[in-house]
Image: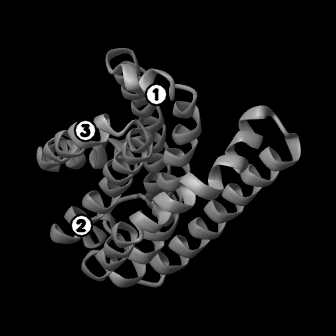
Amino acid sequence: MIGLIKKDLYLIVRSFNLAYLLAFLMFTIPTALNAKMFFPMLALWLAIICATQISSAMTLDEEIDWRLLVSYMPISVHAEVGAKYLLSYFLTAISGILMLVIGYTFSLVIPSLEERRHEILLYTIVCLCLCLLYNAVMIPATYKFGSVKGKVILLLFIALLPLIGILLMKGFNNISNSVIAGRSIVRFLVIIDLILVELASYVLALKFRDGS
């Protein structure tokens, strides 16, 4: 399984597009002037970049007919699918670390962000949840429909970003504050929901991969 993760990481590094960095610069300047939008936009941007790398790796797998190649190797379906999820968790952790590092760095440099520094942890949680939920849908969908049709989900995800942003700014704040404040019931429910979603996603991915 470690070898499969290394293979996907190699594909991700080789296919990483510098356009992501350009997009970061494009949103940084205007949102830095509007302190209220900076951390929500940063969370969404990092979630998109880190979450979609799994899709990129699976697209490259299809281009080289990886499913045929792996059928000749002593690799189980559970190991192949499990490697995708472990990599998605690794990338999710990376998104959270980047959110914390970039958020705190910009809050030290830009005075208007300093007073909103308390929001960094809130939107780090948002970023982590978006990464997990996106790949929970995208991995089984790609196994079922292929990478080309599966990209429709990516388009829907991006199209819903404005709505997601509004919901985050208006409704998610109270829930996240409850989690951060340590209200055990809310925190427990959030964690259980994420675990159930991930388990359901993994079972579906196994079913679609084994039936392909």
Q: Name the residue: 49% across, 70% down.
A: 137
* Badge nearest the viewer, 3 or 2: 3
Q: CA distance from mark 3 to mark 2?
A: 29 Å
Q: Amino acid at mark 2?
A: Thr
Badge 1 amino acid: Leu
Query: Which of the two labelled residues, at mark 3 and mark 2, occupies the earlier sequence position?
Result: 3
* Secondary structure state at the residue bearing disc 2: helix
Q: Using the rendered image of the protein, determine whether residue 1 is visible from the camera's viewpoint.
A: no
Q: Of discs 3 and 1, which sits in the foreground?
A: 3
* Quarter holding residue 63: bottom left
Q: Is residue 66 left or right of residue 84?
A: left
**In the image, is residue 73 above or below residue 182?**
below
Q: Quadrant of the C terminus?
A: bottom left
Q: Which numbered marker is on residue 28?
A: 3
Q: Nearer the viewer, residue 132 or 109?
A: 109
Query: Label 2, on which residue?
Result: 59
Q: Residues within 10 Å of mark 1 (few under 14, many from 20)?
A: some
Find numbered disc 3 in the image and state the secondary structure of the residue it sits on. helix
- Residue 191's disc number: none
**Sequence-first tag of 2 and 1:** 2
Q: Could you give the CA–CA distance between mark 2 and mark 1, rounded to whole angstroms?
A: 30 Å
The residue beneath circle 1 is 100
Q: Few, some or many C-alpha atoms within 10 Å of disc 3 (few <14, some 14-19, many ≥20)?
A: some
- Across and down, in percent, residue 34 comes to 35, 40
Q: How is the image coloured?
A: one colour
Residue 100, image x and y in percent? 46, 27
Residue 41 falls left or right of residue 168: left
Compare residues 143 and 112 and report the one nearer the observer: 112
Label 1, secondary structure: give it. Answer: helix
Toward the top, the furthest residue is 108
Relative vertical location of residue 146 with respect to residue 100 in this rendering, above or below: below
Which amino acid lies under the numbered mark 3 shown in the image of this protein?
Answer: Thr
